[in-house]
């Protein structure tokens, strides 16, 4: 019995950031590269959004042998980390990725596979740098006495008053209604007292 090779289905992905821009130039290039109109996923959305509907639909539809083509890699992702994550998903599905403007970005070649491996390393470095900068920023803010996270729903005076009234027997419901907050907010005030 002979093993059948997976059929190479050319899939295109075209994206522009705003509704004022047009996809026409990308669509023409993708068609010239062998993608039929019905196999081109297109959307008008910023590349920083993780919930790009057409991109997610294309990634879900991928099969072994498919070839995902973009006109430029910035149409697919806005950061090294995102690019690596998306290309890894494509490769893990047994498909290939290629960019028309960047010949090195072709996982069907040994050079392309090497570049994707390098991209993975760069994505790790980028993730570590972001983590380090975030931790440093948080430390500096705390040193300046800035509150981290969501602002408290109650002012210090309201918190003090709610604790006093709770100690005098007021119910969570009464206090929540008086302060115009949820009962969980009042309940947490009691927990903070016990932790101190």
Image (spheres, rainbow, N blue to C red):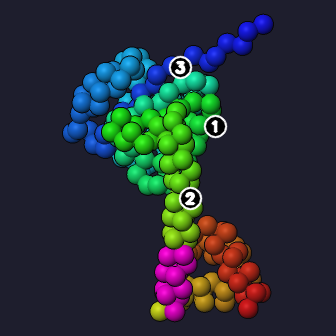
Element type at mark 2:
helix
Of the residues under marks 3 and 1, which one precedes in the sequence?
Answer: 3
Q: Identify which residue, 19 or 183, lies in the foreground.
A: 19
Q: CA distance from mark 3 to mark 1?
A: 15 Å
C-alpha separation, residue under disc 2 versus residue under disc 3: 29 Å
Residue topped by disc 1: 92
Q: Nearer the viewer, residue 95 or 24?
A: 95
Mark 1: secondary structure: helix
Magenta stretch encompasses residue 28? no
The part of the chain drawn in magenta is 132-143
The label number, if any, that marks residue 121 in the structure image: 2
Q: Is residue 67 above or below residue 132?
A: above
Does 184 sit above or below residue 12? below
Q: Residue at x 53, y 19 (%)?
A: 8
Tell me if mark 2 has few (under 14), some (14-19) or many (20+) residues whose alpha carbon lies within 10 angstroms of its own: some
Q: Is residue 22 above or below residue 171?
A: above
Element marked by disc 3: loop
């Amino acid at each position: 019995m002979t093993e059948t090779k997976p059929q190479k289905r050319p899939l295109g992905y075209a994206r522009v950031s705003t509704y004022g821009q047009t996809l026409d130039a990308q669509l023409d290039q993708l068609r010239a590269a062998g993608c039929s109109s019905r196999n081109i996923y297109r959307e008008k959305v910023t590349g920083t959004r993780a919930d790009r509907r057409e991109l997610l639909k294309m990634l879900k539809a991928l099969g072994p042998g498919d070839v995902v083509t973009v006109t430029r890699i910035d149409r697919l992702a806005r950061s090294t980390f995102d690019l690596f994550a998306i290309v890894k998903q494509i490769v893990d599905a047994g498909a290939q990725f290629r960019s028309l403007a960047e010949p090195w970005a072709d996982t069907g070649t040994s050079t392309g596979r090497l570049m994707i491996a390098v991209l993975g390393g760069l994505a790790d470095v980028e993730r570590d740098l972001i983590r380090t900068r975030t931790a440093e920023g948080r430390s500096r803010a705390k040193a300046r006495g800035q509150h981290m996270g969501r602002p408290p729903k109650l002012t210090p005076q309201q918190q003090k008053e709610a604790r006093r009234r709770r100690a005098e027997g007021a119910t969570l419901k009464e206090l929540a209604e008086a302060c115009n907050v949820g009962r969980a907010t009042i309940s947490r005030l009691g927990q903070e007292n016990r932790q101190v």
